[in-house]
Image: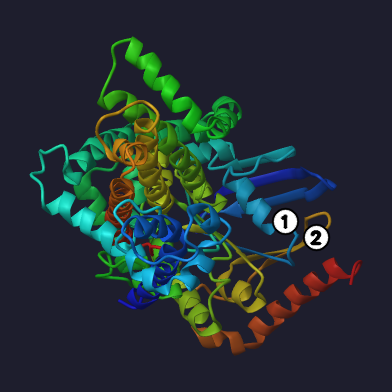
């Protein structure tokens, strides 16, 4: 409960900054509209107004400031507009409707979860290989690092197009992009975790003449649990980002990524912003779920969650 | 008491190759340990006492010389699970209960479940931790954790107990108490114990044989057979006999140090 106040403070600060920015960002658009609606605007031509910054224009037309918060197609929507749009599209629609954010959320969430599952499994297997095989340690790790330096935005359309030409569409291509982003933190975390037992603990097992697999199940795997959870939290949010990126450049018709793109292309910023916030809330919820599982598991394992 | 020799070291040499050049950890070490002995190794840090213990355990391989444990090489003895090893830190797994920690070697060695539970109960009684099997390590004090780690080393009934400064991190009051308990345990179980320490009173109080070592290169500078009786109350430490042995140990340590102090 102690953490609630700082979080609320930060949220309040962000909201305040946002609210302040709405005025200068939308001022020129609002002034143009006000002129069409026969209101008094200074200066009175769009060309002359271009010489002023958003702040400058707002100071000259203080009576127009309230209008910047309710403009229909704003450059920067105000918080209540985004909240309204989200309420309308989450609670105001049947969840099977194409206008429901819940529907689009599930279209994004399903490949996120599948990709996360694939990425985590792959990450753990690679980490085990790296820890137990020197050849894999030297060969796989550099490639895992290189894989993350390739811009996913460039790679995603290629993967989707290539898979599409082979007849693979829908869930799987997006899951692959999600897995591609989420396996890496798991590899790095698990390698560190599996190597975390100190030499004394390893010597102890040697005095029992324990086999490698006994050492893995009895010591290395449980010792890696705190590292695994840290990786899972990064991995699940990376997975969601991967899925959205996979939806962006490929003409997807549904999903958070598609909503963001549609909003941009058809001049409906509210749609983009609502999708953006819905995605952020989804990511926060997923990370939150893993934090709770982490706390319960590590507590039962006698380790303290960090 | 039979004088059967169970650990023998002959002309043992061990050199570590490090980035700063070779380090002569052990030089020309000769020692016999008899069945039922309580042997302490004492000396300043860098004298090779821990290294020698690790050689007995087969955790280090000597560069030259011979060492045998129960008539086998240390590596064979390790595979035959001939000894229990107690480290400086208790090293209990936080995710296992005390009982679960003691079961660890038993699981690895393939004891059946009923046997495991019997043994956990028995060794917990031996170290005075009866009823603690369901507690987690963090619920125990440092001294209790170290006792649990001794119980873990006793669980599979090895004849030899190798202990590497097991009480080094504990305060003196707890240490006295554990020393007393260890002697009782040794009397009851008739194990052979090799014990590394850098406390003179601890070495004299516990041992039938005290091996004084000196550093650079690590070597044995004196071996003292204790004349104290096997039955030792704590106040034996005020007896003239005890003080005399302690003097001899101190002299041995000083002699080994004279070249570089």
Q: What crowding class fits label 1: few (fewer than 14 Cα within 10 Å), some (14-19), or many (20 or more)?
A: many
Q: What crowding class fits label 2: few (fewer than 14 Cα within 10 Å), some (14-19), or many (20 or more)?
A: many
Q: CA distance from mark 2 to mark 1?
A: 7 Å
Residue depicted at x 33% and y 74%: A4
Residue A158 sits above or below residue A181 on the image = above
In this rendered view, identify the residue nearer to me: A34 or B14. Answer: A34
Q: Position of residue A65 (x, y in %)?
A: 38, 69
In this rendered view, identify the residue nearer to me: A178 or A196. Answer: A178
- Displayed quadrant of residue B261: bottom right
Read off the residue under disc 1. B48
Q: Is residue B204 visible?
A: yes
Q: Position of residue A102 (x, y in %)?
A: 17, 45
Q: Chain letter of disc 1?
A: B
Residue A85 sits above or below residue B245 on the image = above
Read off the residue under disc 2. B215
In this rendered view, identify the residue nearer to me: B132 or B247. Answer: B132
């Amino acid at each position: 409960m102690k953490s609630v106040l700082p979080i609320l403070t930060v949220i309040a600060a962000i909201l305040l900054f946002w609210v302040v920015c709405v005025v200068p960002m939308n001022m020129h658009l609002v002034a143009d509209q006000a002129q069409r609606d026969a209101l008094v605007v200074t200066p009175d031509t769009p060309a002359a107004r271009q010489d002023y910054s958003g702040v400058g224009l707002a100071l000259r037309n203080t009576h127009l400031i309230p209008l910047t918060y309710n403009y229909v197609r704003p450059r920067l929507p105000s918080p209540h507009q985004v909240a309204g749009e989200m309420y309308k599209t989450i609670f105001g629609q049947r969840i099977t409707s194409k206008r429901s954010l819940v529907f689009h959320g599930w279209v994004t969430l399903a490949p996120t979860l599948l990709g996360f599952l694939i990425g985590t499994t792959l990450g753990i297997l690679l980490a085990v290989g790296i820890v137990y095989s020197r050849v894999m340690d030297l060969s796989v790790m550099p490639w895992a690092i290189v894989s993350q330096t390739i811009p996913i935005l460039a790679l995603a359309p290629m993967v989707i197009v290539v898979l599409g030409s082979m007849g693979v569409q829908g869930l799987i291509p997006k899951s692959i992009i999600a897995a591609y982003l989420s396996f890496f933190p798991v590899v790095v975390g698990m390698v560190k975790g599996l190597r975390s037992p100190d030499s004394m603990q390893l010597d102890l097992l040697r005095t029992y003449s324990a086999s490698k697999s006994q050492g893995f199940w009895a010591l290395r795997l449980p010792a890696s649990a705190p590292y695994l959870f840290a990786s899972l939290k990064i991995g699940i949010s990376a997975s969601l980002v991967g899925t959205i990126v996979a939806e962006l450049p490929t003409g997807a018709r549904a999903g958070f990524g598609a909503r963001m793109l549609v909003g941009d292309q058809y001049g409906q910023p509210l749609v983009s912003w609502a999708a953006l916030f819905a995605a952020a809330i989804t990511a926060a919820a997923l990370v939150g779920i893993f934090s709770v599982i982490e706390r319960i598991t590590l507590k039962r394992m006698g380790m303290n969650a960090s | 008491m039979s004088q059967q020799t169970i650990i023998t070291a002959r002309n043992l040499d061990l050199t570590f190759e490090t980035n700063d050049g070779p380090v002569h950890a052990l030089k020309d070490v000769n020692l016999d340990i008899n069945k039922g002995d309580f042997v302490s190794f004492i000396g300043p840090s860098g004298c090779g006492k821990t290294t020698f213990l690790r050689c007995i355990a087969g955790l280090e391989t000597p560069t030259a010389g011979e060492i045998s444990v129960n008539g086998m090489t240390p590596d064979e003895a390790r595979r035959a699970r001939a000894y229990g090893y107690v480290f400086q830190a208790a090293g209990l797994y936080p995710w296992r209960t005390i009982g679960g920690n003691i079961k660890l070697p038993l699981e690895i060695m393939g004891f059946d479940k009923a046997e495991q539970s019997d043994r956990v109960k028995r060794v917990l009684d031996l170290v005075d931790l009866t009823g603690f099997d369901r507690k987690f390590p963090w619920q125990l004090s440092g001294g209790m954790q170290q006792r649990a780690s001794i119980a873990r080393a006793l669980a599979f009934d090895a004849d030899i107990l190798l202990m590497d400064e097991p009480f080094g991190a504990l305060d003196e009051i707890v240490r006295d108490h554990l020393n007393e308990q260890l002697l009782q345990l040794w009397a009851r179980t008739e194990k052979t114990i090799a014990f590394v320490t850098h406390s003179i009173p601890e070495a004299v109080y516990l041992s039938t044989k005290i091996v004084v070592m000196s550093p650079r290169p690590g070597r044995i500078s004196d071996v003292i057979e204790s004349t104290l009786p096997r039955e030792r109350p704590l106040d034996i430490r005020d007896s003239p006999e005890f003080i005399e042995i302690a003097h001899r140990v101190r002299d041995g340590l000083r002699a080994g140090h004279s070249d570089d102090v």
